[in-house]
Image: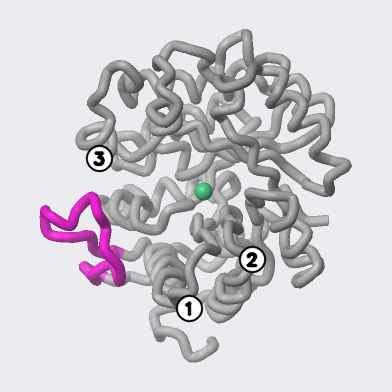
Amino acid sequence: MLGLSHELKYSGPIFDAHTHIIDTDVLQILVKIGTKYGVERSLLICHSLGAKEFAEKMYPGRFVLAKYIPSTLRFTENVDAIVREVKTLREEGYALAKMQSAPMMRGRVKVRPDVLKMDSVELDPFFEALADEDIPFLLHLSDPDTYYEKRYNDQNYFSSKKADLQELEGVVARHPEVKLQLAHFAAQPETGRLNELGKWFDRYKNFNVDMGSARWMVRELGKAASKSRSFLTKYAGRILFATDCVAYTPEIDYYEGRYKSLRLLLESDAKSVPLPFTDADTVDSGGTFINGLALSDSVCRKIYWENAERLYGH
Ligand SMILES: [Zn+2]
């Protein structure tokens, strides 16, 4: 198809379930490169109402629009402030809410790790508002193991990945009525974490995961390709293709590298192909390589398209 690498065999439509718009001037580049790689629809996280209106006008019907709710609002104002963001979401024309509540956000506003955790009772009004309005919630809460090793050492703001995953599981367990999309494979694409993520899938039915962050997914899922292949095949109905591409730069290679490497990961049997862009987490330790999972066509179809259409199509 499309003169892409002969290793890309899937020829159906693709839904990219995690993209961002920051700069309206470069949205057309995200769309153009996505289209080249088969993307027909995307979930677009809008960082302003103006950006949302622009995207809707330029590409009617292409995007499922997510409202970015700053997680830091609950610290700098109060929980009511994020509840209000939910209450106005539908009338502003959004379909879902997105929150980035990764550990770095606590560092940014200098808040201790035990204050207003997402699974605390203080946050219940927020989740009740999502449930009342039947608004799906896309949540990024934890990060790669590499970040905890290298970046999250200041104990004033950061605890541990174990504690952050407990917080994330707490959200899933305490709010069965909220439809959740957990970003970045629920922060558990690392080989040693797949068994636990499988238990979550078996125990809780209210969440799906996305594959946002090509370098993180490629780096970790490719480390034990046959184990990952079995895992993605088993839970194919709960996994969404996603790049986490951010429309912020005119640099074509930025978008191209992410679409290409994720598609090679899923469809191909590539072995030790260098990631076509720099992975800051492995740049000093030999780099990141793509090892393809060679998923079947029917598994690809679910992950690339059917799951997202079922959740967000109309
Ligand atoms: Zn993102």
Mark 3 and mark 1 lie on one chain; the one further toward the N terminus is 1
- Classify residue 284 as left or right of residue 14: left
Residue at x 34%, y 57% (from the top left corner): 215
The amino acid type found where label 2 is placed reads: Thr
- Classify residue 248 as left or right of residue 206: left
Foreground of the two, 245 or 293: 245
Q: Mark 1 highlights which residue?
A: 9
Q: Write the start and end of the magenta stretch as one range.
A: 271-291
Judge the density around disc 1: few (<14), some (14-19), many (≥20) Cα neighbours within 10 Å.
some
Residue at x 50%, y 31% (from the top left corner): 101
Judge the density around disc 2: few (<14), some (14-19), many (≥20) Cα neighbours within 10 Å.
some
Q: Mark 3 highlights which residue?
A: 146
Alpha carbon distance from label 3 to label 1: 32 Å
In this view, 106 is above or below 301: above
Q: Mark 2 highlights which residue?
A: 24
Badge 3 marks a residue whose secondary structure is: helix
In this view, 250 is above or below 152: below
Mark 2 and mark 3 lie on one chain; the one further toward the N terminus is 2
Q: Are marks 2 and 3 in contact (CB under 8 Å)?
A: no
Instruction: Kindly report the secondary structure that dominates the magenta region of the rendered protein.
Output: loop
Q: Is mark 1 within 8 Å of ligand 1?
A: no
Badge 2 marks a residue whose secondary structure is: helix
Residue at x 55%, y 63% (from the top left corner): 247
In this view, 108 is above or below 295: above
Residue at x 26%, y 58% (from the top left corner): 279
The amino acid type found where label 1 is placed reads: Lys
Please indicate, yes or no, whether residue 307 appears anywhere in the rendered image.
no
What percent of the width, then of the height, locates residue 274? 23, 69
The amino acid type found where label 3 is placed reads: Thr
Q: How is the image coloured?
A: one colour
Alpha carbon distance from label 2 to label 3: 32 Å
